[in-house]
Image: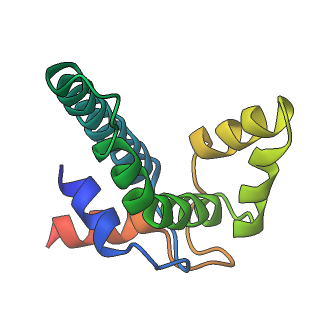
Amino acid sequence: MKWYLDALKKYAQFDGRSRRQEYWMFRLFSVLFMFTALVIDFLIAMLADIPLFIFTPLYILAIILPSIAITVRRLHDTNNSGWMFLVGFIPFVGGIWLLVLEVTEGTHGPNDYGEDPKEIRELIQSH
């Protein structure tokens, strides 16, 4: 949950780098919260007998900017431009290529987009 909240705090930060763990924990909690919103929407729809979905679209709207920001920072960790995010919109291959970049280990040491977040975290934990 800490990773999710940290990513939300950096909702409009498109510079710097994000580790794989930060990225995937954010994605995991996003899916869990989306599923929860869907369940609530379905329950309301069944009880009220109206197909009214409010929570899911609101959650999607709230999470879109933080999702883009963390994806850009994740791409920066692999020393790729944040604009590579747009590759994901190419049918079929775009999503696969973006997934490959998202699971790729970040560059060791500093790169064009900043210091290695893994090294910074390890340095903080060792003191």
| Image position of 21 (left or right of 125) | right
Can residue 7 be spotted in the picture? yes
Q: Position of residue 17 (x, y in %)?
A: 51, 69
Residue 11: quarter of image: bottom left
Q: Nearer the viewer, residue 81 or 94?
A: 94
Residue 28: quarter of image: top left
Above or below: residue 9 compared with residue 37: below
Residue 14: quarter of image: bottom right
Name the residue rendered at 18%, 65% in the picture. Answer: 125
Name the residue rendered at 35%, 28% in the picture. Answer: 51
* Quadrant, the C terminus: bottom left
- Describe the colour scheme in one phrase: rainbow
Can residue 81 be spotted in the picture? no
Q: Position of residue 70 (x, y in %)?
A: 49, 62
Name the residue rendered at 18%, 49% in the picture. Answer: 1
Q: Position of residue 60 (x, y in %)?
A: 42, 51
| Image position of 86 (left or right of 49) | right
Count of numbered circles on the image: 0
